Image (cartoon, helix red, strand yellow):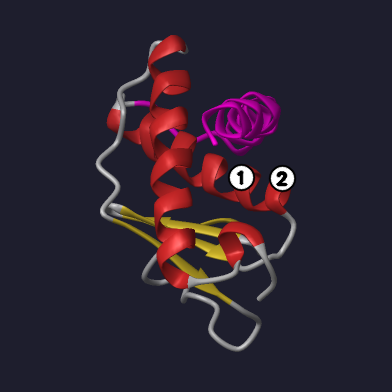
């Protein structure tokens, strides 16, 4: 899959943990509850989740109770945006709000640069 965090499973898992930790900080700053996320799973065009088993945020992001499913990409900002969209949607639900798609994607896009910057500084 390439170099960097996407190069191997262990590095990717650790990188996703760091992304989730940074997103938790942002969620709290927005006055939302941090959701319980037990898994971030990846899919491709052949393994897309069923809309019966997950809430579709876009063709690239689905959520379910305790998990985020994202379409795999080698582009780190897109990967962060997709994880963030799922995380913010779950945080809205955990806070008793509806995961309005416009708000979810606004928050996700706004989170990409700060998350990537903090991860770069911590490396």
Q: Is residue 119 above or below residue 56?
A: above
Q: Kindly identify which residue carries mark 2.
A: 77
Residue toward you, 120 or 80: 120
Q: Kindly identify which residue carries mark 1.
A: 80
Residue segment shown in magenta? 97-123
* Rendered location of residue 61, percent (x, y): 57, 57
* Rendered location of residue 31, percent (x, y): 39, 11
* Rendered location of residue 102, percent (x, y): 66, 32
Label total for image = 2
Q: Is residue 123 above or below residue 86?
A: above
* Rendered location of residue 55, percent (x, y): 45, 57
The residue sitting at 39% across, 27% down in the picture is 24
Q: Are marks 1 and 2 in contact (CB under 8 Å)?
A: yes
Q: Does 99 sit left or right of 58 as displayed?
A: left
Say what secondary structure mark 2 lies in.
Answer: helix
Question: Does the segment drawn in magenta span residue 20?
Answer: no
Q: CA distance from mark 1 to mark 2?
A: 5 Å
């Amino acid at each position: 899959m390439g170099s960097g965090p996407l190069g191997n499973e262990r590095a990717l898992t650790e990188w996703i943990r760091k992304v989730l930790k940074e997103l938790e900080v942002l969620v709290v700053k927005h006055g939302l509850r941090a959701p319980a996320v037990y898994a971030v799973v990846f899919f491709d065009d052949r393994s897309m989740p069923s809309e019966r088993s997950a809430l579709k945020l876009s063709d690239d992001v689905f959520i379910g109770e305790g998990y985020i499913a994202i379409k795999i990409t080698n582009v780190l900002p897109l990967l962060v945006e997709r994880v963030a969209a799922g995380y913010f949607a779950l945080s809205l639900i955990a806070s008793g709000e509806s995961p309005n798609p416009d708000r979810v994607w606004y928050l996700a896009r706004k989170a990409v640069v700060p998350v990537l910057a903090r991860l770069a500084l911590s490396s």
